[in-house]
Amino acid sequence: MARPSPAAAKTERLLNLVIALLHTRQPLSRARLREAVPDYAGSSDEAFERMFERDKDELRALGVPLRTEPIDPFFDDEPGYRIDQREYALPEIDFAPDELAVLGLAARSWSQASLAGPAAQALRKLEAAGLVKDETSVAGIEPLLHTREPAFEPVRDAVLSRTPLRFDYRGGSGDLTERHVQPWGLTSWHGRWYLTAHDLDRDAPRVFRLDRIAGSPTKAGRKGGYDVPSGHDAAAMIRSSVGEDDGGTTTVRLLVREGTAASLRRRGRVVTGTHDADPGQRSGAGSGSGPVDEGWDLLELPAGSLRTLAREVCGAGPDVVVIAPEELRSLVSQRLEAVLVAHGTDAGTGHAGASAGPDEQTRDLG
């Protein structure tokens, strides 16, 4: 029979120690613990002391409430150890119906990806606990995340554990080069997975497409050997690397229907006052200069790439109206005109999302 790996043996020893400490109301002495945990019993005095001290520190680092108390209140010369079950036990977890719906949606999104097994297992545990999910609020939504790249799992593990990696990478020229990196983030962008990292050979931040990594990356250092910059923005790095960053920041003003466009709202702020659209716009909440209609918010947010933001505004359909700048209004108009032409509609009937008001946008897109 094969012997367990050192990591597996250590995990088993820690588990046995936790079980022994949990199932006692009285503090246990070192001698009693040495008898209860097999790895301790078969080791020398010196090895036992080293292992036990390391294991105590590791349990506390993991958040286990390990108490040190006197075995006899009248004689405190020998300390004992125990885990208070009331502190160790997790409180009852309660989710609101909409939270359960989102958790179910998140689990389904991995159904065709490498995390399908863990996601399904987590969902079964919720159902076993009697937490029935309400899917009516997300009916018709079926997101799917695909992770067919062989590099996905080792890169994901390296990002989570902050472990340096080494891999062969095929650049735009098609040549393979060996890269040594400190992984920072793993992000899905426009249907592809990207690794943001610090390239040790070039001593600079770099972005790598996972489908260009040849084979499986290998570890090239110890876990936790570096820190990820506190201001790291993976999406901004990716946008810059693919040429979608205009190299500046523009303040954008949008009219947004209440309860919609959550991603835009997270990046911006609702401002009060009147909106200043061009007088030539047609009637509706997005036309002329005047107060914001009920059911709408005037949102102000910074934008690094107007081209990227234009796609997001188009995706929001009639729920977002561009007020300023004119360049963004033009980009949105061009994209929506292309959609109308592609569907055999006369583009001259209106510019949804840019010049039409919310009600008229709905008619144009319908």
Image (tube, grey):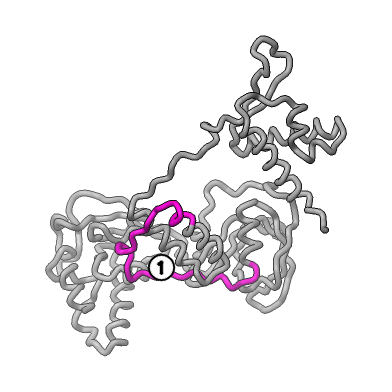
Q: How many dots with numbers?
A: 1
Where is residue 91 drawn, in percent x and y?
Answer: 46, 39
In this view, 129 is above or below 119: above
Residue 53 image point, x, y percent:
75, 31
Q: Quadrant of residue 257?
A: bottom left
Q: Quadrant of the N terminus?
A: bottom right
Left or right: residue 166 compared with residue 255: right
Q: Residue at x 79, y 40 (%)?
A: 39
Q: Which quarter of the figure is the C terminus placed in? A: bottom left
Q: In the rendered view, does 125 fall on the left or right side of 55?
A: left
Q: Is residue 127 magenta?
A: yes
Residue 17 lies in quadrant: top right
Overall secondary structure of the magenta stretch?
loop
Report the residue at 14% width, 56% height from top: 294
Q: Which is more toward the observer, 27 or 256?
A: 27
Above or below — where is 332 with respect to 20?
below
Q: Is residue 318 visible?
A: yes
Does 241 appear in magenta? no
Q: Where does the magenta region start and end?
A: 125-151
Work out whether residue 237 can be spotted. no
Kind of residue at disc 1: Thr
Q: Is residue 282 left or right of residue 156?
A: left
Residue underneath mark 1? 308
What residue lies at 70% left-to-right and 49% top-to-bottom?
Answer: 223
Name the image quarter holding residue 345. Answer: bottom left
Instruction: Give the residue drawn at x 42%, y 69%.
Output: 143
